Amino acid sequence: MVERINPGEFDLKEKVIHINRVAKVLKGGRRFSFNAIVVVGDGNGVVGLGLGKANEVINAIAKGTEQAKKNLTKVSILNGTIPYPVKSKYGAGYVIMQPASPGTGVIAGGPIRAVCEAAGITDILTKSNGSSNPHNVSKATFNALKNLVSAESAAKKRGISLSKLFHG
């Protein structure tokens, strides 16, 4: 179901979700390295998530952006929100997302907000339970959005019309 998307076709904007500094203690002192979680999206249903690691912050962000562009996926958005409620778990991070009426806005915090805004979702209600680790929460959010199925693709997959899908 997941198809490859060419990043050159879209006007992608990147957003850094989190930067983590890791210290390795050696004989001469501490050696620092960084990892960065980056989300890219066109604000119109295409979003990607990546993790970059390097000895410099700028290089970590650049690597994360490249990784995110390789992981682009199309998200099913209906009138600025998601088509139905969805739950997702990654590691100890647990995310609940529900569609919202127009004008509600993005009711989300931290990593969930960044991923939803990059995808182009304007109205959504979310709750993050379990771990607040940005790695797990952002991956859980990305997986939830990636696994959403639009009504058109569900009808096509079953080989029936849209009206029969909704009205039995």
Image (tube, rainbow, N blue to C red):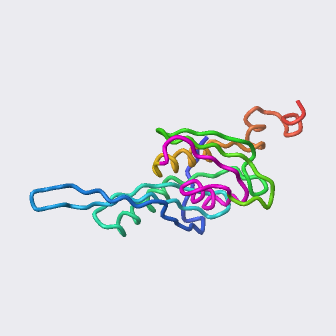
Identify the residue at image location x=55%, y=58%. 6
User: Furthest-left residue in view?
Assistant: 27
Magenta segment: does it hold 130?
Answer: yes
159 or 82: which is nearer to us?
82
> Residue 117: x percent and y percent?
63, 61
The C terminus is located in which quarter? top right
> Residue 81: x percent and y percent?
74, 53
User: Furthest-top residue in view?
Assistant: 168
The N terminus is located in which quarter? top right
**Total marks in image:** 0
Reply above or below: 19 against 74. Answer: below
Q: Quadrant of residue 157?
A: top right
Identify the residue at image location x=57%, y=66%. 12
Reply above or below: 162 against 82. Answer: above
122 or 7: which is nearer to us?
122
Q: Quadrant of residue 20?
A: bottom left
Magenta segment: does it hold 116?
Answer: yes
> Residue 140: x percent and y percent?
54, 44
Identify the residue at image location x=46%, y=55%. 50
Identify the residue at image location x=51%, y=42%. 93
70 or 136: which is nearer to us?
136
Q: Which residues are magenta?
A: 107-132
> Residue 113: x percent and y percent?
60, 58
